[in-house]
Image (cartoon, helix red, strand yellow):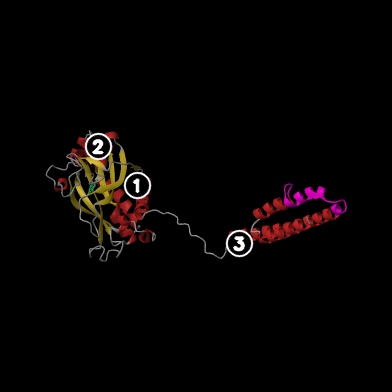
Amino acid sequence: MKEKLEAIKNAAKEAVSAAFDEKEIEELRVKYLGKKGELTAILKQMGSLSPEERPKMGQMVNEAKAQLEELIGKKAKELKNAATELKLKAETIDITMPAKVKKVGKLHPLNTVLNDMIDIFQSMGFDVLDGPEVETDHYNFECLNVPADHPARDMQDTFYLGTNLLLRTQTSAAQIRTMETRKPPIRVICPGRVFRADEVDATHSPVFHQIEGLVVDKGITMCDLKGVLEQFAREIYGPDTKVKFRPSFFPFTEPSVEVDVTCSECGGKGCRVCKGSGWIEILGAGMVHPNVLKSCGIDPDVYSGFAFGIGLDRLTTTRYKISDIRLLFENDKRFLDQF
Ligand code: DAH
């Protein structure tokens, strides 16, 4: 029995010293010291010993038990400390590491300029409306007094989606929709995308942006048109900006003008951006043609109005000195990050 005890002790010591983690050491404690453990089993066999041997053997078993308890306790503590250390190491934060920079989204330059324009017109009492990008021939051309043989109606210039449906070539279509649903006094702008079958180059894109404006009321004259558009140009380009109104032609306005501002790049001296002229064209405008008012059920003998169409892309490229319109549509982050 003594030898058996010795063998158990040795095996236990060996197993304890080899134990790898807290779970294993707990299993060893149960195996040797538990109620059904090996040492307890020996104690149970003591009945077969002679009365003299019994106390000796009892003492030896108790000593072995105490030894093993101490050994297991020590090892358990060691393993626990090692595990804690390992955990701490894994969770260590290196406060000298550079922080992760959170990328914050920002407005596209087109939106920044659009928002500025909306602010300017809203401060003059204009409402902001939306119109559909898929339009009918009726709204995009017919009601705008664009004759059937006008070149803009050609397949070469317009994206047709069917015989009567098309992608709007101008936000002017929104004028008609507005006059059909609102009665004068009308003061609205309608920003949006427009589409033309243009070849892509540094100044042309098949998709671009316009802001349409419409004012209809009693007694509206060309002076109102000039006042509003001059005010707009000075707010966008600065108070010293000169504004020039050139006679022009649009089927839906009479008289019609095109509006130029002093080139923001050279201040009017002439440069590459303004092609040496010192001026940049920013919009088309005019007094709403009586036929257009009539087609919307507004009596041109009682009411008059003016309309304008501003190119948002041109305004943005000149403001930020962007040399190629394509940059606005490619959405290259390296480009957009500069704004
Ligand atoms: N729709 C014209 C274009 O796309 C721009 C324009 C000119 C709009 C005169 C107007 C206007 O409202 O009165 O070129």
User: Marks 3 and 1, how far apart in space?
Assistant: 62 Å
The residue identified by callout 2 is 303
Magenta stretch containing residue 73, yes or no? no
Q: Nearer the viewer, mark 3 or mark 1?
A: 3
Residue 97 image position (x, y, % from top left): 54, 64
Magenta-drawn segment: 34-55
Instruction: Give the percent coordinates (x, y) of residue 35.
Output: 74, 47
**Mark 1: secondary structure:** helix
Residue at the image point whose x is 29% and y is 54% from the top:
313
Q: Name the residue that disc number 1 marks.
A: 121
Q: Is residue 224 left or right of residue 42?
A: left
Q: Which residue is mark 3?
A: 89
182, 73: nearer the viewer: 73
Quarter of the rendering occupied by the N terminus: bottom right
- Image side of residue 194 versus residue 109, left or right: left
Which dot, 3 or 2, sits closer to the camera? 3
Q: The residue under label 2 is which amino acid type?
A: Tyr
Q: Amino acid at mark 1?
A: Phe
Q: Main secondary structure of the magenta part?
A: helix
